[in-house]
Image (spheres, grey):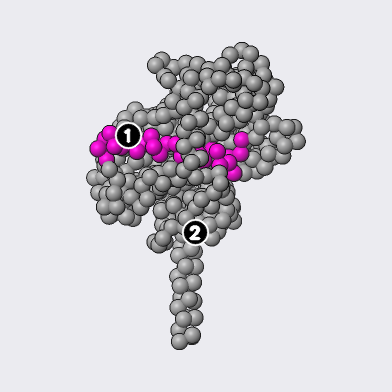
Amino acid sequence: MADDALRMIDEEQGTGDARRAGLRRQLLAGETTIWSRPTGPRRAFSSAAINPGAVAAARDRAVRFRPALAALFRQAGWNGAIASDLVAYPDVGGARILVKADHDLPVTGSIKARGGVYELLCRIEEIGLREGLLPADDYAVLTEPAAAERFARYTVSVASTGNLGFSIGLVARAFGLHARVHMSADAKAWKKERLIKLGAVVVEHPCDFNQAVDLARVEALRDGHIFIDDTSSAELLLGYSLAADEVLAQLEEAGVAPSLAQPLVVYLPCGVGGAPGGVTYGLRQRLGEALVTVFVEPVASACMMTALAFGNGAPMPVYALGLSNDTVADGLAVATASPLVLEAVGDDIDHIMALPDSAMLEWVRLAWRARGFRLEPSAAAALAAIEPLLAARPALAGAVHVAWTTGGSMQPDEEFLPLVETGVERATRAYRRTATS
Ligand SMILES: *Cc1c(COP(=O)(O)O)cnc(C)c1O
């Protein structure tokens, strides 16, 4: 009896190890690779910082800041709400597809406008209160010259592969704060140039994102700067989670009511995990098991898959598997996933899809031709994951699929047009050239 039990455990171990070895082989070969969560009840999560009450407070704060954002980033008819459209997309493999068009978000043109910018607004609100700028509930006063003078005494610091730094730098400078943006080797030249024009200081690091975060954090602590930490911030996660109510209201308007029989399948491009993690947290609260989440990563930077499939749910650098973290998807070029995200929603990730760069570049072109979307490769990952998921899980063909296109509308023509006007191989070369120029 005891011997039998022992043998069964051995066999399970054996299969688990064999599965992991197969997964690793596939990743190292650069192939499209899927990992799926073992079935079973989900681990409950609650914390003092991340809970439904905190989400409600975050929503109120975002609303309070609308007049200030509308005043600083004048766009015709814009009321200062950080929100995007939910739009129809041609069927993929017979499945109904909707696109959550965060590539077109106001202010920054990427999903960072939801989370990264939200955390910066938390810090700005604190300064406003401390400096006596906010006697009333009228946040438009924060955009007046007297406020900018006070904000100029503060420096905000952030580390990024490009979009977070771009977004934080842009908004910090608009309010009058100094900005120090630490860019990893992945960052595109145009994002750095635009920040420098806005008066931000761009510090270039020849290393990867996680190392840039460590260097920036130490410097910010030493110099008394405000540090926006993408790898451990609950506020950032809350900012992203606000997207859940927004998309659910849009789905309701479109006549979509997710259920166990017809779940909502959401494709979320994943870097360190904050953006997809926050959206997942918000949606799981509302939908429970009527939600299927698919995190999408570049195969070379599959840090979430590495943590969940190989690291027992704890962060583990992709280098440990022999992966390079070298990808055209600069928004997702992250070697180690966020420990906070793994703790908060690690057990809410149903599938992880790792994709080769060629698939993302192909879908940049397809989405341009089909709908005129200006996507960056990181954002196109969401669309690129649909076909492989349906191939692996044909039962989901009847579900409603939402591809979250996370960035790209602000790419200049010189950056974007080579991606869509040439073949995938030439596009890859063009993209790499702009990365290092
Ligand atoms: C940052 C980013 C993501 C992923 O966000 P993480 O919080 O790093 O997981 C996805 N797409 C784009 C375009 C991004 O800029």
Tag 2 residue: 309
Residue 417 visible from this viewpoint:
yes
Find the residue positioned furthest to the right. 222
Q: Which residues are magenta?
A: 228-256
Seen from the viewer's position, the closer of residues 394 and 54 is 54
Q: Quadrant of the N terminus?
A: bottom left
Q: Position of residue 199 (x, y in %)?
A: 63, 20
Q: Secondary structure at mark 1?
A: helix
> Is residue 357 in sight in this rendering?
no
Q: Quadrant of residue 83 in the image? A: top left
Task: Find the residue positioned furthest to the top.
Answer: 145
Magenta span: chief secondary structure: helix
Which mark is drawn over residue 250?
1
Check if residue 305 falls in the magenta segment: no
The image shows residue 377, relative to residue 142, as above or below, that is below
Amino acid marked by disc 2: Ala
Vertical placement of residue 151 versus 208, above or below:
above
Q: What residue is at 40 percent from the left and 41 percent from the top? A: 382
